[in-house]
Image: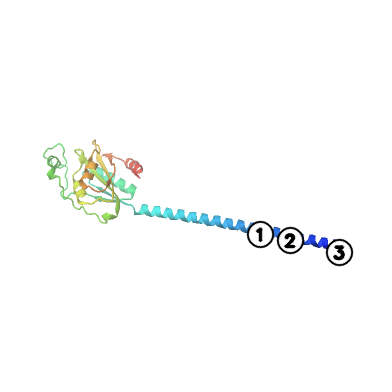
Amino acid sequence: MKKLITLMLSSMLVFSLTACQGNTISETESKESHTKSVESSSKEQSKSKESSNELSKEQSTKQKDNKSLVVYYSSTGNTKTVAKYIADETSSDLFELIPKELYTNDDLNWNNKDSRVCIEHDNPDKRNVELSSTTIDNWDSYDTVYIGYPIWWGIAAWPVNTFISANDFTGKTVIPFCTSASSELGESGKLLAEMTGTGNWQEGKRFSSGASKDDVVSWIDTIK
């Protein structure tokens, strides 16, 4: 009888130890599985952040590489003011078109049929205005070019024509803008685009002669 009881107790002890060992293994495996899951999640999050950072860097680089230039002709200073506002807001370089023979106040007297500007208007062959320079350093590096001018008789002031004809706008986004007391932009930008035959010309903007910086900034915000 004692042997039987001893045998039963031994069997119970072995079963108990086996069960405990099984539970310990199960708990260990569970902890290891949880640890691996956390590590995997952390690695995925890390990869996601790295991917996001790389994308942000790429976008930032593209923005920095997208250089812009403001080219303008200004006869009375109004277009020059707007051009500077645009350059400040867009971090663009500036290039002023300067006729070798400058226009005087008498030259710009629209009411005098014998003034220089009236004679040039009546004789298109006299509108080939020679500029001090039409060459821009690193021209190929500019992706966006703003072209500014006053409106003369419903079209772009013709000193701009010389620059347009002398340069290749292939691959560039071209945005015209003008200043005028009353005239609208009209087809001035379209005519310039036809003249050069190159570039991706966008719809332009007409500013009043006394345009403020807020007017210019509001426009820039709509085309960014």
Q: 53 or 127, which is in the foreground?
A: 53
Can the viewer see residue 74 in this picture? no
Residue for badge 1: 28
Marks 3 and 1, Cα distance to the nearest angstrom?
38 Å
Residue for badge 3: 3
Q: Are the residues tagged 3 and 2 within 8 Å (C-beta)?
A: no
Image: 24 above or below 175: below
Q: Which mark is residue 18?
A: 2
Amino acid marked by disc 1 = Thr
Number of marks: 3
Labels 1, 2: front one: 2
Left or right: residue 104 compared with residue 20: left
Amino acid marked by disc 2 = Thr
Q: Quadrant of residue 12?
A: bottom right
Image: 14 above or below 113: below
Reading the chain from its start, which is encountered first: label 3 or label 2?
Answer: 3
Left or right: residue 208 compared with residue 118: right
Marks 1 and 2, Cα distance to the nearest angstrom?
15 Å
Q: Secondary structure at mark 2?
A: helix
At label 3, counting other C-alpha atoms closer than 10 Å, the crowd grade (few under 14, some 14-19, many 20 or more) is few
At label 2, counting other C-alpha atoms closer than 10 Å, the crowd grade (few under 14, some 14-19, many 20 or more) is few
Q: 169 or 223, which is in the foreground?
A: 169
Q: Quadrant of residue 185?
A: top left
Outermost residue toward the bottom in this view: 3
Q: Quadrant of the N terminus?
A: bottom right
List x then y, in percent, for residue 17.
75, 61
Q: Secondary structure at mark 3?
A: helix
Image: 64 above or below 152: below
